[in-house]
Structures are given as structure tokens and as C-alpha cells.
């Protein structure tokens, strides 16, 4: 038992089990929250599952010799690489939400746009085939 709590002086690479353990615990805890609470599991128990899985990951990293400062720096760098994609998703969500609330009818507009694009592509293909046939 004491070997599990031994902290390394220099950072060591993780074993496969140590790398999978936080993810597996998160999947298990989220599944358990939906099993126990149903749809209400999304309001609170999922956040608890995220915090517990994060605590497991931090404990494993600390036990392998990584400082809390280096773990925090790695986490902030990881989030900063994906933040632009998150802002794009927020912008698209806001645009679609505004469009839906405006009363224009989101689904008829999208259906018409898809039909238009499909017909335009079909016409372009026919035109390309006609040009190829005429040139040969």
C-alpha cells in the first residue's frame, strides 16, 4: 500500500493503466449518474464526476513526480489550443439561435438551401459532362 503513495522526485512517464484510469473513471461515473438520476444527471452529478476524475488524474500525476504548477500549466495550454474552436461554435450557435427566434422558419430555410445547393451541383456536373462531350 505504501508503494502506491510513493512520490517520485523526477517526473516519470505514465503506465497505460495510469493513463486510462481517469478516463475510465469519468465514463463510469457519468454512466452511473445517468443510471441513478436519469435526465436530471446532467444538471449536477456530471460536474461531480468531472471533478472526481480530475482529482484522480492530478493524484496520478503528482504521484509520478509532476508538480501542481506544471500540471496547471499543461492544462491551461491544452485549453488555449482549443478555445478558438469553442468561440466559433458559440458564434454559430448564436447565429442559428437568432435565426430560429426571428420567425423565418429555420427548417424550411435550411431545406430550401440544401435543395438549391444540390440542384446547383447537379447542374454543374451536367454542364461539365456536356463540355467534355462537346470537346471530344
Image (cartoon, rainbow, N blue to C red):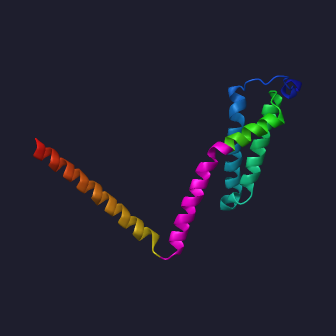
**Residue at figure coordinates x 68%, y 44% from the top left:** 79
- In front here: 9 or 73? 73
Q: Residue 95: give x, y in percent of width and height.
A: 53, 65
Image quarter of the C terminus? top left
- In front here: 104 or 107? 104
Q: Say left or right for 121 vs 87.
A: left
Q: Is residue 130 magenta?
A: no
Provide the residue span drawn in magenta.
80-103
Q: Say left or right for 78 vs 108.
A: right
**Residue at figure coordinates x 76%, y 42% from the top left:** 54
- In front here: 4 or 135? 135
* Residue furthest to the bottom: 103
- In front here: 88 or 38? 88
Q: Say left or right for 98 vs 7.
A: left
**Can I make out residue 75 in this image?**
yes
Main structural element of the magenta stretch: helix, strand or loop?
Answer: helix
Q: Residue 58: give x, y in percent of width and height.
A: 79, 37
Amino acid at each position: 500500500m505504501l508503494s502506491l503513495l510513493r512520490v517520485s522526485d523526477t517526473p516519470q512517464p505514465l503506465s497505460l493503466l495510469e493513463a486510462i484510469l481517469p478516463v475510465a473513471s469519468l465514463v463510469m461515473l457519468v454512466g452511473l449518474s445517468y443510471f441513478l438520476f436519469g435526465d436530471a444527471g446532467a444538471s449536477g452529478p456530471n460536474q461531480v464526476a468531472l471533478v472526481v476524475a480530475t482529482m484522480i488524474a492530478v493524484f496520478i500525476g503528482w504521484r509520478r513526480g509532476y508538480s501542481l504548477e506544471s500540471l496547471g500549466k499543461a492544462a491551461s495550454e491544452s485549453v488555449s489550443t482549443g478555445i478558438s474552436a469553442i468561440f466559433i461554435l458559440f458564434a454559430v450557435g448564436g447565429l442559428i439561435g437568432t435565426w430560429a427566434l426571428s420567425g423565418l422558419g429555420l427548417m424550411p430555410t435550411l431545406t430550401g438551401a440544401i435543395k438549391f445547393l444540390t440542384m446547383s451541383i447537379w447542374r454543374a456536373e451536367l454542364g461539365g459532362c456536356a463540355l467534355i462531350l462537346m470537346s471530344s
